[in-house]
Image (cartoon, rainbow, N blue to C red):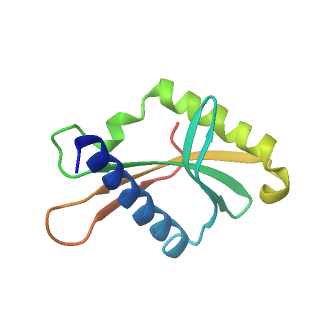
Amino acid sequence: MTTAASRQAVGAYGESVAARFLTGERGMVLLDRNWRCAEGELDLVLRDGPVLVACEVKTRRGDGCGSPHEAVDAVRLDRLHRLVWRWVEEHTGAAGSVDEVRVDLVAVLRPRRGAAVVDHVAGLA
């Protein structure tokens, strides 16, 4: 596998783990995955009760590239907020009435052996 393909596979794995965790453990409803527009991409779009959640998923195989939490800076957070409202504009029927949105982070650590470690941070500010 090429380096790009390897990164893509790790990312897809992390998004699957995050989706299972959020829908199973947290009881959220998955509305969309890998939604793209000209401005960027949302990894996961979910409903948490009345709140629409845009979830950024960061997956790491180790801590050599820094923590997944460090990857979501103020610029990225701003873009995620813009993207989720853009998603709402295009999907009002699927989302129903949306009064509140939230941006979450799911950090997935994929160790060489054993189960993935998942850290869900709700409501990045």
The image shows residue 47 at horizontal and vertical percentages of 67, 60
Whole-percent x, y for residue 58 in the image: 37, 47
Residue closest to the eye, 70 or 10: 10
Residue at the front extreme, as displayed = 1
Q: In this view, does 117 lie to the left or right of 16?
A: left
**At x 23% / y 42%, what residue is drawn?**
3
Which of the 4 image quadrants contains residue 119? bottom left
The residue sitting at the top extreme is: 75
Q: Which residue is found at the position 40% from the left and 56% from the top? A: 12
x 33%, y 54%: residue: 9
**In the rendered view, does 41 fall on the left or right side of 37?**
left
Q: Give the percent coordinates (x, y) of residue 116.
A: 28, 66
For the point 80% across and 47% down, the residue is 99
Give the vertical position of 31 relative to 91 (above or below).
below
Front one among 120 and 110: 110
57 vs 82: above or below = below
